[in-house]
Image: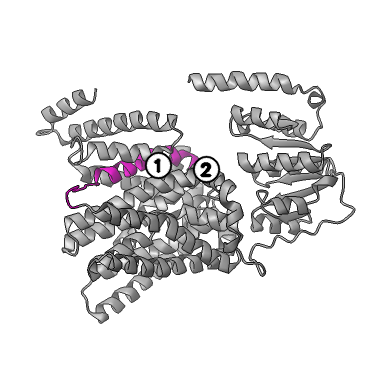
């Protein structure tokens, strides 16, 4: 099929440019689908499949997709839409709580990683100019990769997700400033002038958006009468602000994000997000393919030892640097680890820096290939690590206490539970599912204690006089301190299999009379939970309003619930999934 498409392409390419593009896209998506199927069966993230498809179709292999520029331009649309959606979904009030911390983490990580990266490059015998490009390349993390993976995991609005996003935005601004400086002459006056002008331009853009907010909201109120007009006008707004940002030398990404933020207060932002997501996914796939298409490697002059050392520095060294900074600020080890691992790859801006170095003659082709290889390798490795963050933390979490302050922590996890608080219900996680369960319990006037890993959530609950404590359910010491031996029911709304299983085992040890309800990601996990002694397991896809009442023992159907029957149903469901 692929060679048939390639044959048609060669026949039409000389007199039909549009036909060539259509065939290129067809080949890309066919190859990406084949790799995606294989990667999915291996349990790996699909991003890897898209990058592999690009490598196969690029100059290092089949050389089928030759006109990469138009594919890159199309992929840029996906990045704009992605960051526009992130801005739409961002709760600015919650993000503001950790803006200072994200700024300190971002600036601190950039400075330390840049300095260490420069000295590592010098140690390898790189020239000062190559060492500078190496440190810049390794310093920044990928906004696109992190947002895509955290969105897929539904962690973008979690504590570490918001911190990661804040750090990435700081990095993007610094990366843009670095690009501006690299394109100026080497005069100190030119550097200072370029920086000052960039800051003034960014400030002017933000002020313009702020004062136009009310006018834009009135326009969108009229557009909302038609869902089609709402979609078109939203995309138009995103590209308009992205274009203005681009003209001000701040890149399309910053503009798209700001465009989303200034529409985030609209009551129909969720409808806009839902409509744009499918369009975004199409173009974002092309972005990952272009990473592979642009990859080139000269094996004769390539130094694998240097590449391996730089990869280890980005994955391991940058993770340690970020955890040290976050630990110093008072974040708990779990938040620090999740954030640090999310940022352990090279940025898309790094590839722009490499291309600029080649264009200016500062980098040779072998030097650029080395940095490009390091970038793509870190993206692939970090993608796997981010997908398995919880499993990794489960095994190494106990060794990470050295990255945590013993006193004066930013995340206050002091537990103040009244001594007479007994026969109560403990809910782990107060996300959208947890809130629905919480509302049902309050209607029944049940005695409740909420545990969450997000300080902002705890603060909100406590302001509403709801008993709530901050804590990490993956921390055995915290579970013991909770006093679960006095509760009658524990409900976990988190999706972490390892944390839930550890919680189940601990409760079974200290309070055999306590009933346990948990969420499972798939039928196989649900069966494992039942075998461990869980009273009821629910798959998120099956969770309904009636199920909420059932979970808290309100309906009579719950009393007749048959665990063995449910296990049989889960096994049948699992076989159907495998068959598909």
Judge depth for marks 2 and 1 and give the one in front: 2
Q: Nearer the viewer, residue 294 or 222?
A: 294
Q: Position of residue 334 (x, y in %)?
A: 59, 55
Q: Residues within 10 Å of mark 1 (few under 14, many from 20)?
A: many
Q: In the image, is residue 316 above or below residue 267?
A: below
Instruction: Reply above or below: 362 against 370.
Output: below
Residue at left 87%, top 44%? 423
> Is 363 placed left or right of 85 in the picture?
left
Q: Is residue 294 magenta?
A: yes
Q: Quadrant of residue 556?
A: top right
Q: On the image, numbered disc 2 is attached to which residue? A: 153
- Mark earlier in primary sequence (2, 1): 2
* Residue 123 magenta: no
User: Please, is residue 278 above or below residue 374 in the view?
Assistant: above
> Which colour assignment does the render follow?
one colour
Principal secondary structure, stretch drawn in magenta: helix
On residue 75, the disc is none
**Which region shows up in magenta?**
272-301
Q: Farthest residue in the bottom direction?
A: 189
Q: On residue 280, which mark appears?
A: 1
């Amino acid at each position: 099929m692929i060679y048939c498409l390639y044959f048609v392409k060669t026949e039409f390419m000389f007199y039909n440019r549009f036909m060539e593009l259509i065939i290129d896209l067809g080949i890309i998506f066919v190859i990406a689908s084949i790799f995606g199927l294989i990667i999915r069966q291996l349990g790996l993230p699909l991003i890897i499949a898209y990058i592999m498809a690009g490598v196969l179709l690029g100059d290092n292999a089949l050389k089928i997709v030759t006109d990469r520029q138009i594919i890159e331009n199309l992929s840029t649309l996906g990045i704009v839409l992605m960051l526009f959606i992130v801005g739409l979904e961002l709760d600015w009030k919650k993000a503001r709580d950790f803006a200072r911390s994200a700024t300190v983490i971002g600036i601190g990580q950039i400075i330390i990683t840049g300095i260490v990266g420069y000295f590592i490059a010098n140690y390898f015998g790189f020239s000062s100019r190559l060492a500078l490009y190496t440190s810049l390349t390794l310093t920044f993390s990928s906004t696109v990769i992190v947002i895509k993976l955290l969105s897929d995991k539904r962690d973008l609005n979690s504590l570490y997700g918001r911190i990661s996003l804040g750090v990435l935005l700081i990095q993007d601004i610094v990366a843009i400033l670095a690009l501006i400086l690299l394109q100026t002459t080497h005069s100190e006056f030119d550097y200072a002038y370029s920086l000052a002008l960039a800051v003034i331009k960014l400030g002017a853009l933000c002020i313009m958006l702020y004062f136009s907010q009310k006018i834009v909201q009135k326009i969108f109120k009229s557009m909302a009468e038609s869902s089609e007009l709402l979609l078109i006008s939203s995309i138009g707004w995103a590209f308009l602000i992205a274009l203005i940002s681009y003209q001000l030398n701040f890149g399309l990404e910053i503009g798209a994000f700001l465009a989303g933020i200034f529409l985030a207060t609209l009551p129909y932002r969720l409808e806009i997000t839902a409509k744009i997501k499918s369009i975004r996914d199409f173009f974002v796939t092309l972005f990952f393919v272009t990473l592979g298409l642009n990859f080139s490697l000269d094996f004769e002059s390539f130094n694998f030892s240097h590449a391996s050392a730089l990869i280890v520095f980005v994955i391991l060294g940058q993770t340690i640097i970020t955890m040290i900074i976050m630990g110093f600020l008072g974040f708990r080890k779990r938040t620090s680890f999740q954030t640090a691992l999310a940022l352990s790859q090279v940025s898309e801006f790094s590839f722009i820096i490499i291309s600029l170095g080649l264009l200016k003659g500062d980098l040779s082709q072998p030097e650029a290939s080395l940095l490009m290889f390091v970038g793509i390798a870190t993206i692939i490795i970090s993608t796997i690590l981010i997908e398995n963050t919880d499993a990794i933390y489960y095994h190494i979490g106990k060794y990470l206490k050295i990255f945590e302050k013993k006193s004066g922590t930013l995340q206050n996890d002091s537990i103040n539970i009244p001594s007479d608080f007994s026969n109560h219900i403990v809910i782990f996680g107060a996300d959208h599912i947890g809130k629905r369960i919480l509302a049902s319990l309050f209607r029944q006037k049940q005695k409740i204690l909420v545990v969450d890993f997000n300080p902002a959530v705890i603060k909100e609950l406590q302001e509403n006089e709801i008993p709530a404590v901050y804590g990490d359910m993956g921390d055995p010491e915290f579970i013991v301190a909770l006093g679960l031996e006095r509760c009658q029911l524990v409900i976990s709304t988190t999706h972490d299999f390892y944390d839930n299983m550890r919680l189940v085992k601990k409760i079974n040890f200290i309070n055999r009379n306590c009933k346990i309800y948990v969420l499972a990601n798939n039928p196989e996990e649900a069966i494992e939970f039942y075998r461990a002694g869980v009273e009821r397991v629910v798959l998120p896809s099956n969770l309904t309003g009636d199920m909420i009442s059932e979970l808290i023992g309100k309906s009579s159907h719950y009393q007749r619930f048959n665990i063995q029957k449910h296990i049989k149903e889960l096994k049948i469901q699992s076989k159907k999934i495998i068959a598909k």
